[in-house]
Image (cartoon, helix red, strand yellow):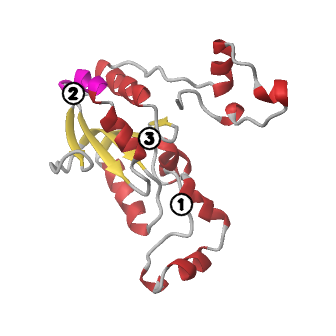
Amino acid sequence: MSAKPKVGVFKFASCDGCQLSLLDAEDELLAVAGKIDIAYFLEATSHIDEGPYDVAIVEGSITTPSDAARIRDVRQRSKFLMTIGACATAGGIQALRNWADHDEFLRAVYARPDYIDSLATSTAIADHVPVDFELRGCPINHHQLVEVLVSLVNGRKPKTPSHSVCLDCKRRGTVCITVAQGVPCLGPVTQSGCG
């Protein structure tokens, strides 16, 4: 990584929640800000640097042919590509359309569906280009994002949890509602750090 890595933040199909989490981390980011060069982040600034980038941070899923072409371009101009959030890592809520009739949805929603250039599925970034690191969550945990950026600047591997929320509950002494009350819980399938 160069002395002051050039970072680009890119949005695809998403609600912007992960980028807003990043902007909400202003206090933590101030500590990192002098060590990185935010070269592209349309949510935060109108300054545009076309790269190449040391780090690309990508939010959102691929839902159109132009998205697919654009993510290939971002990947080509980036040494390290990190996806953030459920949309980028798993297709997001918009991936619900993957199990329905795409053309029927277009006809029901748009007066002129022939004007819409959309893929039949919403897919994760890793389905289109190699991804170097993923931060899951909806939205992401901004502390984890700051940890990854600090790690990259310092040339070390990021320390982010790889276990499920169940372990967090056990560590806090929280009684498992599934075991104690028979109530369903998504803890076993939810990565720790989701808030």
**What amino acid is labelled 3 in the image?**
Ile
- How far, Cα to Cα, is label 2 from label 3? 19 Å
| Residue to which mark 2 is pinned | 33
Q: Residue 187: image x %, image y %?
A: 68, 31
Image disc number at residue 122: 1
Quarter the N terminus occupies: top left
Sort mark 2 into few (<14), some (14-19) or many (20+) by Cα contacts within 10 Å. some
**What amino acid is labelled 1 in the image?**
Ser
Query: Residue at left 47%, top 50%?
Result: 125
**What amino acid is labelled 2 in the image?**
Ala
* Extreme residue toward the left, this view: 47
| Residue to which mark 3 is pinned | 84
Tell me the magenta residue range.
27-35
Can residue 17 be seen in this snapshot?
yes
Q: Are marks 1 and 3 in contact (CB under 8 Å)?
A: no
On whether residue 8 falls in the magenta region, the answer is no
Q: Residue 61: image x %, image y %?
A: 47, 54
* Label whose residue precedes the other's in the sequence (2 or 1): 2
